[in-house]
Image (cartoon, rainbow, N blue to C red):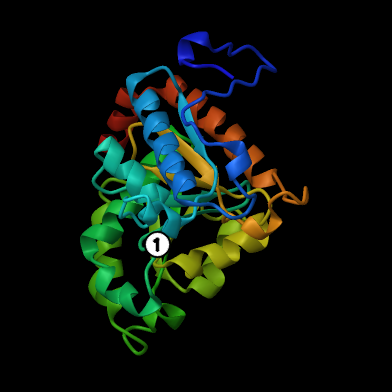
Amino acid sequence: TIQSLAQANFSEGALQVLQLSNLDPLAIIPGRPNEACAKAMARYIIEAVAMALEGPLDSVVTCPINKGLLQRAGYSFEGHTQMIAHLTGTHRPVMMLAGKRLKVSLVTIHCALRDVPSRLSVNEISEVITTTCRSLIVDFGITRPRIGVAGLNPHAGEEGLFGDEELNMVAPAIEKASKKCWEVKGPLPADTLFWRASQGEFDAVVAMYHDQGLAPFKLLHFSDGVNVTLGLPIVRTSVDHGTAYDLAGKGVADPGSLISAIEMAATIVRNRKKIGTEQASMAMAEQ
């Protein structure tokens, strides 16, 4: 345990624990977090982001949190992503789930399915596409990204027969984003798009809502998927699963996603240092 980063030893194999709270271990029941845990959890996030912004840390890797618990601590955010965006002054963060075979960015995240259409717009969809494109260049080292964009409705609306969101929002957003991105195709039927992406036709998929993107993603990357927040001034990755309090203390939880999140954060840091933010911005402008 260390009291400040100045005491840290970042040599290979060293594990440093920075003491940030005064939680009494004897007062904590595994799997049953209380208000004190909630406040400590929020502080860990705030301090980690601050250290990444100020420079001592290259990246932040977060474990899952309970969103209801976060709000009990006095923070009215839908989750990690929105809280970290607020702390970093980021207008439009993008949630991407990333694995070796599939990368998926979401336009809407945690909202009721009935609310999805009203949360979509040409600008929202376009921003997610362009942010995804930039991340593929800067974070993943893909020089000419290929992005497939899913439609909202079955068969991507079938030319308006099953809904007009594709005609009125998705297609115009793709046209707008195409001015800044190498290759963007869509709107495409989701039932075939994810298979095509998993076979290497696309470097990433932009999905319109949570389960449209995460259901196929987790079929491929249930144990090693990584949640990456795009558009931030810092590198932030996380696991792609929840808290699973029912597994606390049983020694049966799978650490695969957390291991992958740590490894991916290190990879993104290396890629960003290699390409340089200024060079990446120029690459986007030339597209």
Between 51 and 102, the residue placed more toward the observer is: 51
Task: Name the side, left or right, on which 143 lies relative to 214.
Answer: left
Which quadrant does the N terminus fall into? top right
Between 131 and 181, the residue placed more toward the observer is: 131
Taking the spot 23% from the left edge, 56% from the top edge, the residue there is 176
- Does dot 1 land on a helix, a strand or a loop? loop
Q: Does 156 sit above or below residue 135?
A: below
Taking the spot 26% from the left edge, 62% from the top edge, the residue there is 173
- Corner quadrant of residue 244: bottom right
Q: Position of residue 217 (x, y in %)?
A: 58, 60
Asked if residue 141 can be seen in this view, the reply is: no
Within 10 Å of disc 1 (Cα), the crowding (few <14, some 14-19, many 20+) is: some
Q: Name the amino acid, label 1.
A: Ile
Q: Position of residue 247 (x, y in %)?
A: 70, 56
Q: Position of residue 207 (x, y in %)?
A: 43, 63
Q: Position of residue 63 (x, y in %)?
A: 55, 43
- Corner quadrant of residue 144: top left
Which quadrant does the C terminus fall into? top left
Q: Does 98 sit above or below residue 175?
A: above
Task: Name the side, left or right, on which 262 lies relative to 151.
Answer: right
Residue position marked by numbered label 1 in the rendering: 109
Q: Does 132 sit above or below residue 25?
A: below
